[in-house]
Each structure stands twice: as structure tokens, then as C-alpha cells.
Amino acid sequence: MRRVLGVIGICALAAAALVAGVAAGTGNATVPTAKAATVPTITVTMTDFKFKLSKASYAKVGKVKFKVVNKGKIGHDFKINNVKTKLLDPGKTQTITVNFKKKGRFAYLCTVTGHAKLGMKGTFAIAVAPITTTSTTGTTTTSTTTTTVTGPATTVNVNMIDYGYQMSATTIPQGTVTFVIKNSGNEIHNFDLQGKKVGALLGANGTETWTVGLAAGTYQIICDVPFHVDRGMTATLTVTP
């Protein structure tokens, strides 16, 4: 009888140990955790004076990283949805994370004075179709105005350098004037005949040709790139009756 009771006791202890082991195993079991959402990264390349984004849109509302790289020759920054990089010197990079809480098109720009006016702006689309834009900076373009002024046709060759204008003539008769413009400088420049025609931003060796009708008077010419006027990039054109 004692032998039977001993066997029963041993079995009971073994069973209790087994139950404890199972309970302990259950308590130490790893509970799967939710996988963190992947934040997309958009590369923003800045030059003088243009933004190029690796993608113009993202399909979902939420966080987006912007890796901003300055490949220009002067400082720029990048601002979108009230989040902005610091002023980045040439060759510098910064990554910012922006939380878009609703779908739509969000404007971005460089906040340095005058840079947005020169083309450093655009829109990034969240869960909507992006807007497609084109630029003529650094390309050869030809345009003609419809303004008609009585007088002979004149051609003025304009050579833009860092930082000045070399013009084949600075006094011409009123009439139709064709400007043949080339950028021989290393930096971006333009030929802004104030009040009449704003020329395109041209990179090194860029050219353009356009025609305007000019009545008698004095016309100021400037380069719209920030600080270029301060460095002397202005000229005067006199048009006689």
C-alpha cells in the first residue's frame, strides 16, 4: 500500500512540474509587434536657381523625408509645409521630415531673397496628381513681341559676363530691336530690359534671341540674379527718335 501511495505521489509531482513548465513557457512567449511604417525619402537637388525632386508626388498622406543637397555655387534653403532646412552652403546636405496630414499640393521654395522669383519654387503632391512644369533656364529660346513702333529694324548683340554687359550698341534709333544674347560668364545671368522684356535665366554659354518695339527714351537693363546689380551688372540703352 505504501508503495502504491509513493508511486501516486511521484506522478502527482511530475504532473505539477509539467503544468508549471507549460505555464512558464506561455508566460515567456514573444508577442509579435506591429511593423513600423516606412517613411519615403525624396531627394531634392538645388542648383542656381532651380529645384529638382526625385519624385514630384507621394501616394499617401503621412510623413515624407526630404534629403536636400545643394549643388549650386551659392547658399540655398528648402521650405515646404512650414518645415525648412537651414541655409545650406555649396556641397552641403540636410534631411528633414515633414508630416502631411491631408492630401493636396504643397508649395515649396527657397526663402533666400529673390531666389523664388528666379525659379526656385514648385509644388509637391500628396495623394493627388502632380503639376508638370517646364523651364527654359540655360536653353536657347527665340521670341518676338507684337508691339509695333515706327522706325528701322536694329540688331543689338549682347554678351553677358561676370558681372557686366558688353553691347554692340548702347544708342539706337527707335523701331524694332532684336537682341541676340549670350552668357559668356561662369554664373547664371539674364538680360532684363526693364518695363519691356525680362530675359530668361541663362547658364554658361546659354543663348536667346527676342525682338521688341522700342520708342524713343532711356531704358535700364539689369540682371535679376540676387546681388548681381550690387556687383555692377547694369546698363543703359538710349533710343533716339
Image (cartoon, rainbow, N blue to C red):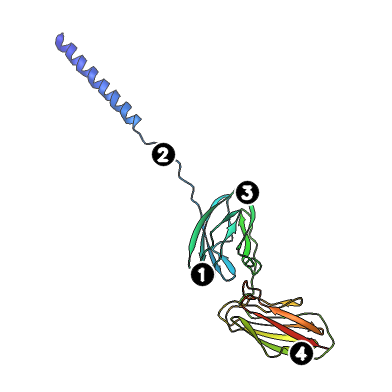
Quarter that holds the C terminus: bottom right
Report helix, strand or loop for mark 1. Answer: loop
- Using the image, tell me which numbered label, if any, was put on residue 32: 2
Q: Which residue is mark 3?
A: 102
Cα–Cα span, label 2 and label 3: 30 Å
Residue 36 horizontal/vertical position (percent): 46, 46
Q: Earlier in the sequence, mark 3 or mark 1?
A: 1
Closer to the camera in the image, 75 or 36: 75
Of the two numbered discs 4 and 2 in the rendering, the one whose residue sits closer to the viewer: 4
Of the two numbered discs 1 and 4 in the rendering, the one whose residue sits closer to the viewer: 4
Which amino acid type corresponds to the residue marked 2 in the rendered image? Pro
Q: Are marks 4 and 2 in contact (CB under 8 Å)?
A: no
Residue 195 horizontal/vertical position (percent): 76, 76
Which amino acid type corresponds to the residue marked 4 in the rendered image? Ile
Q: Which residue is mark 4?
A: 172
Cα–Cα span, label 1 and label 2: 44 Å
Cα–Cα span, label 4 and label 2: 81 Å
Q: Is residue 182 left or right of residue 8?
A: right
Which amino acid type corresponds to the residue marked 3 in the rendered image? Lys
Task: Identify whether 160 is placed above or below 60.
Answer: below
